[in-house]
Image (tube, rainbow, N blue to C red):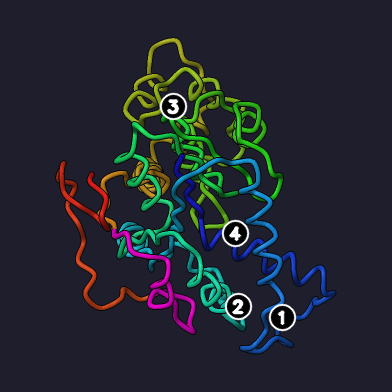
Amino acid sequence: MIVVVDFNNIVYSAFHKSLRQNGIKDMTQLNWFYAGHVDTFRIMLLKLLNGITYNRIVFALDSKPKHRQALYADYKAQREPLPINPKLAIAKEMETWNGETLYSNGYEADDAMAAFVARHEEEPITVLTSDKDMWQILDHDNVTIMNPVKVKCVDKADLKDAFDVEEYSHIKLVKALWGDSSDNIKNAVPRMQRYLLPIIRESDGTLDDFFDRVFQPGVKLSGKCLEYLKNNQKLIETNYQLASLVYTCPYLLEPLADIGKYMSSGRDQPAPEGVVPLQMVPGASIGGYTI
């Protein structure tokens, strides 16, 4: 069993939980040496790992999302940086752990994890994350996702509650049509869920199949809905690309002891010197492991 940890996701969950536990409501009071979340992170992680028998643990790190910013310049542009970087104190502790870092320059941790899963289809993998975008990888039979907040495995009931669809392949379509305010992605067809969700549920999850079904004879949609779909088709296509995980992105695996070089005092993590994107060549060796 391989455990893949969405590092940023759990760090920020632990950070905000520690603020609540310590009664801190004004983050401007914090300074660079605040480390109240380190113990919270450790407890959360150990609780998640309890009962999982694994022989390898990998911590997926974020890079500046150049890939998605090239598609949409304002991707996540509305997010204000925190007064401190909560990753620094935790990364310092993680240097003493046995494990690996997973990093893809120019891509988010989501993409690095998806690419890692695509290269390890023969091994059982448990991903620790509360990011619903990652649910797309549950189409891989060898993958389980554990929600670190609810401490439970994600299942089809969670998918239904969150997106009102029944297949993980439909997540991209839902986000393509209605956007994601947390990522600053625009809603292309507001207030049209009840008309379009039945079409999404019947589709194979691709845009081509969705639009083929929308414009089939006999499909009854309001003039307003059709207007949105026609006028905002380019927006929908961009949203779909933004929502899609990049299974082919290159990534680098390194010892967890080297995690510090991926950290910075600012919001973004710069690519460390010497990192060269790897090609998906069967038989190549990455960090001592063969693809």
- The amino acid sitting under disc 2 is Leu
Specify the farthest residue to the right: 23
262 falls in the magenta region: yes
- The amino acid sitting under disc 4 is Ile
Tell me which residue sits at (44%, 49%) in the image: 56
- The residue tagged 1 is 27
Q: Earlier in the sequence, mark 1 or mark 3?
A: 1
Which region is colored magenta?
Answer: 252-269
- Is 240 in front, or is 99? 99
* Element marked by disc 1: helix
- Is 283 in front, or is 198? 283
In the image, residue 217 above or below residue 236: above
Alpha carbons under labels 3 and 2: distance apart: 37 Å
Q: Which mark is residue 10?
A: 4
Q: Can you give x and y, in whole percent of width and height, for residue 72 in the image?
A: 37, 59
Is the residue marked by circle 1 packed among few (<14), some (14-19), or many (20+) residues within 10 Å? few
* Element marked by disc 3: loop
Q: Can you give x and y, in whole percent of width and height, for residue 38 in the image?
A: 66, 72
* Element marked by disc 4: helix
Q: Can you give x and y, in whole percent of width and height, for residue 121 in the image?
A: 34, 33
Tell me which residue sits at (39%, 11%) in the image: 217
Is the residue marked by circle 2 packed among few (<14), some (14-19), or many (20+) residues within 10 Å? few
Callouts 1 and 2 close, C-beta under 8 Å: yes
